[in-house]
Image (spheres, rainbow, N blue to C red):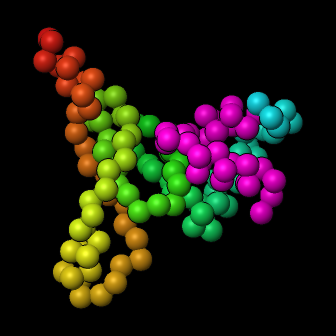
């Protein structure tokens, strides 16, 4: 693993947000002045292919990256903000229905976040 990949992995694992490649680039640039955006994309692709990070794709937004930890996501349909949520019994339920173990899944639940819901009600 390259030094940039290690630093990106650390940034992702420590973040409470779901950062885009550009946001990760700006964070990394604070300490690694010579890093370029293409290097960040290349390292993120390798980390994703190796299963060290999650890539979250939502229509109309850039891909965002997240730690490998069992959880799902709430996505605001209006502003695109991502929030973590855990459906504790979902994996067991899916495996029971399939009759076998599952490797992984990516569940996104779309809703209106509290801020957008407040704006909508104020109209």
97 left or right, relative to 26: left
Viewer-side residue, 3 vs 34 = 3
Residue at the spot 49% in from the left edge and 39% down from the top edge: 17
4 left or right, relative to 108: right
Magenta-drawn stretch contains 115:
no
13 left or right, relative to 114: right
Kindly give the residue lying farthest to the top in the view shown.
Answer: 123
Residue at the spot 61% in from the left edge and 41% down from the top edge: 21
Q: Could you tell me residue 106's position as x and y percent?
A: 37, 60
Residue at the spot 62% in from the left edge and 68% down from the top edge: 50
Viewer-side residue, 86 vs 79 = 86
Most prominent secondary structure in the magenta stretch? helix
Viewer-side residue, 49 vs 94 = 94
Magenta-drawn stretch contains 22:
yes
User: Residue 78, relative to residue 110: is it above or below?
Assistant: above
Q: Could you tell me residue 15's position as x and y percent?
A: 55, 42
The quadrant holding residue 23 is top right
Q: Could you tell me residue 86's position as x and y percent?
A: 31, 56
* Quadrant for the N terminus in the image: bottom right
User: Is residue 42 something that shows in the picture?
Assistant: no
The quadrant holding residue 94 is bottom left
Kindly give the residue lying farthest to the right in the view shown.
Answer: 34
Q: Report the magenta residues as a range.
A: 1-29
119 left or right, relative to 108: left
User: Residue 53, relative to residue 83: is it above or below?
Assistant: below
């Amino acid at each position: 693993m390259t030094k940039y990949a290690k630093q990106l992995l650390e940034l992702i694992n420590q973040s409470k947000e779901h950062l885009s490649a550009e946001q990760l680039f700006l964070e990394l640039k604070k300490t690694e002045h010579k890093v370029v955006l293409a290097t960040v994309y290349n390292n993120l692709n390798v980390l994703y292919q190796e299963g060290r990070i999650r890539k979250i794709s939502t229509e109309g937004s850039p891909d965002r990256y997240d730690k490998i930890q069992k959880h799902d996501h709430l996505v605001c349909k209006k502003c695109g903000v991502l929030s973590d949520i855990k459906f504790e019994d979902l994996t067991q339920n899916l495996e029971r229905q399939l009759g076998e173990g599952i490797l992984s899944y990516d569940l996104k639940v779309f809703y209106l976040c509290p801020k957008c819901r407040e704006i909508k009600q104020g109209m």
